[in-house]
Structure formats: C-alpha cells, structure tokens
Image: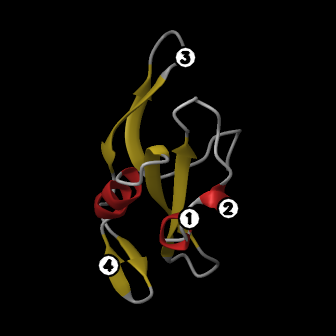
Amino acid sequence: MRSGWIYTGDLGYQDEDGYIYLSGRAKDFIKRGGEMVSPEEVEQVLRSHPLLDDAAVIGVPDVNGVRKSEQWWSAIRKHKRRTDHRVLPRPVSRV
C-alpha cells in the first residue's frame, strides 16, 4: 500500500465523483506453485459459487518479488447479509 492505495497491477481510472473503474489487467497471469494461473479463470470459478456475489484475484508480490495470487471476494446471501468466509467450501475460500 502506498499513499493509501493498494497497487494491484490492474488498469483503471477514477472519475470526477471519486468512483474507481477497473478496465483491464496489466499482467494476465500469476505464478502460483510454479505454474502460471489465469486470474480470470479463478474468478469465474469463484463467481460460480451460489453464495458469492463477486470475486477478484490479484497478484501480490512476495518478499522475492514473485507475484503470488491472493483472492478477494464478496459473499452475499439472498437476504443481502455478508457471509463469513468460514461457511464457504474450502476450495472456494482458499483457491
């Protein structure tokens, strides 16, 4: 985090009202466990879970500068209350 911003490597812009829009990825793959992983494919799997409203996967550099994947998601039940990540199946909560 720099100056209050998290640098994800995504491309985007902020409008005059302060809203932030993501328009693409600067890098399309993340190295995870020696393999190159597509964040979009992981996001699609996460979004297919019935408790998830949305998901995002970003690369976060480790101490050696290698981008490792980190998952972010918003889980919302039908009654619009946030769902604790512990109720999600393990493959979804830790991809």
Q: Which residue is mark 2?
A: 86
Mark 4 or 1, nearer chain start: 4
The residue at the point 55 percent across, 39 percent down is 76
Query: Front-most of 31 and 53?
Result: 53
Label pair 2/3, CB-CB below 8 angstroms: no
Marks 3 and 4 sit apart, C-alpha to C-alpha, by 34 Å
Mark 2 or 4, nearer chain start: 4
Query: Front-most of 47 and 18?
Result: 47
Marks 1 and 3 sit apart, C-alpha to C-alpha, by 31 Å
Label pair 1/2, CB-CB below 8 angstroms: yes
Q: Which residue is mark 1?
A: 93
| Residue mark closest to the camera, 4 vs 1 | 1
Secondary structure of the residue carrying numbered label 4: strand
Residue type at tag 4: Met
Residue 34 in which image quadrant:
bottom left
Mark 2 or 3, nearer chain start: 3
Secondary structure of the residue carrying numbered label 1: helix
The residue at the point 41 percent across, 57 percent down is 46
Badge 2 density bin: few <14, some 14–19, many ≥20, Cα 10 Å: few
Label pair 3/4, CB-CB below 8 angstroms: no
Mark 1 or 3, nearer chain start: 3
Percent x, y of residue 87: 63, 59
Q: Which mark is residue 36?
A: 4
Residue type at tag 2: Arg
Label pair 2/4, CB-CB below 8 angstroms: no
Secondary structure of the residue carrying numbered label 2: helix
Q: Which residue is mark 3?
A: 18
Marks 1 and 2 sit apart, C-alpha to C-alpha, by 7 Å
Label pair 4/1, CB-CB below 8 angstroms: no
